[in-house]
Image: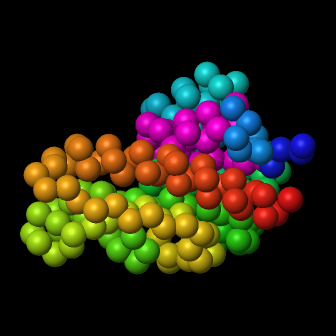
Amino acid sequence: MKKTRLVVLISGNGTNLQAILDACAEQTLPAQVVAVFSNKPEAYGLERARRAGVPAIAFPRREGESRPDYDHRLAEAVEEFQPAYVILAGWMRLLSMAFLGRFPNRVINLHPALPGAFPGTHAIERAYAAWQRGEVNCSGVTIHIVPDESVDAGPVLAVQQIDFCPGESLEEFEGRVHEVEHQLLVNTLKTVLERSL
């Protein structure tokens, strides 16, 4: 079976990237990660890619470089790997249309909250703080297409709700969110890839 080409963009530890790499290696995901890019050269996720034999590319923003210029340069570099999909797995930069326009309906993002809730960074911490204040009793994980520059918005591919447990710490909640992220991301990608075969 032909494997779908994926490029993964990360900014940090890369645990969601690892889940994808493992699923590809175990052949539970009919895909191949052909490159991993990070805007942060020190991101541990690049080491995960190297260990899996995947090109690991540090791609920091140049001094004085505008967001559209950076995104255009990134799009050119990503396009060289001819991905069917670009996966944002802990990518902590907003992408402009200079990037998104090159991969219409082919950029998939993971947001560690429910649709429309806590857009932007630190969603897990913000959801936990809202629970502590009695404003919410659950959070979740959303996988969605990124059609434009709206933050953590776009056609939803999958959602999983996560209820808070009385007395749990932020670290415990965060651990549960990451477990759901890894499973939901791989399962959603599997569904998307099977549909597009």
Is residue 87 left or right of 103 when viewed as pictured?
left
Horizontal and vertical percent for residue 92? Answer: 45, 55
Horizontal and vertical percent for residue 45? Answer: 51, 34
**Quadrant hosting residue 20:** top right
In this picture the colour scheme is rainbow
Identify the residue at image location x=18%, y=68%: 130
Along the viewing direction, whichever of 27 and 147 lies nearer the viewer:
27
Outermost residue on the top side: it is: 51
Evaluate whether residue 73 shows in this view. Answer: no
Along the viewing direction, whichever of 99 and 172 lies nearer the viewer:
172
- Give, as a single range, the part of the protein colored magenta: 5-25
Identify the residue at image location x=36%, y=51%: 177
**Quadrant hosting residue 37:** top right
8 inside magenta stretch: yes
Identify the residue at image location x=23%, y=59%: 164
Q: Quadrant of the C terminus?
A: bottom right
Evaluate whether residue 52 shows in this view. Answer: yes
Along the viewing direction, whichever of 124 and 173 lies nearer the viewer:
173
4 inside magenta stretch: no
Identify the residue at image location x=61%, y=53%: 187
Horizontal and vertical percent for residue 159? Answer: 48, 67
Outermost residue on the right side: it is: 1
Is residue 157 left or right of 151 when viewed as pictured?
right
Q: Quadrant of the N terminus?
A: top right
Total numbered labels placed on residues in the image: 0
Horizontal and vertical percent for residue 34? Answer: 75, 39
